[in-house]
Amino acid sequence: MLWLADEGVTASLVRELRGAGHDVLSIAEFAASLSDVEVIALASREGRLLLTADKDFGELVFRRGHPVPGLILLRIDPGNGPLVLARLLEAINEFAQGLHGRYVVIDEIRFRSRSL
């Protein structure tokens, strides 16, 4: 799966996703100065799911109409890396390619999902 990890996504989570066979571009590794709008544009151009912990992306997508292939919002304390990874992998297994075209919020207990 193709991912674009916003700079708020930990390096360890990026490494774990790559280790699981995902193609992950990390904003923190190559373009930390990009604005949120530029991040969304990059995800769209490259057909990548946008992985973030920043709620502002929902505003840009839903209220301002910026298109994105898929938006996954992590609402788990990043200090709890094993839980973040476990829940993200559960969401990937549950939704698979259905992550495309969806906004999915991942928290410690449930997934919330809606069409983009």
Image (spheres, grey):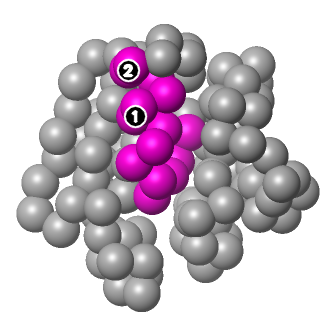
Q: Are marks 2 and 1 in contact (CB under 8 Å)?
A: yes
In the figure, is residue 60 to the left or right of 72?
Answer: right
Considering the image in quadrants, where does the N terminus appear? top right
To which residue does mark 1 refer?
A: 58
Considering the image in quadrants, where does the C terminus appear? top left
- Front residue (pair 6, 102): 6
To which residue does mark 2 refer?
A: 62
At horizontal 46% and vertical 23% (from top left) the residue drawn is 61
In the figure, is residue 45 to the left or right of 107?
Answer: right
Residue neighbourhood size for the residue with mark 2, other residues' Cα within 10 Å, grouped as few (<14), some (14–19), many (≥20): few
Q: Inspect the image, locate mark 2, and give the three-letter code of the amino acid beneath it.
A: Phe
Q: Position of residue 93 (x, y in %)?
A: 31, 45
In the figure, is residue 45 to the left or right of 95?
Answer: right
Residue interval drawn in magenta:
50-63
Residue occupying the far right of the picture: 30
Judge whether 38 appears above or below 69 on screen.
Answer: below
Q: Position of residue 106 (x, y in %)?
A: 27, 53
At horizontal 48% and vertical 12% (from top left) the residue drawn is 65
Q: Position of residue 51 (x, y in %)?
A: 52, 48
Judge whether 20 appears above or below 38 on screen.
Answer: below
User: Is 68 one of the magenta-colored residues?
Assistant: no
In the figure, is residue 102 to the left or right of 40?
Answer: left
- Front residue (pair 38, 81): 38
Residue neighbourhood size for the residue with mark 1, other residues' Cα within 10 Å, grouped as few (<14), some (14–19), many (≥20): some
Residue occupying the far left of the picture: 109
At horizontal 38% and vertical 20% (from top left) the residue drawn is 62
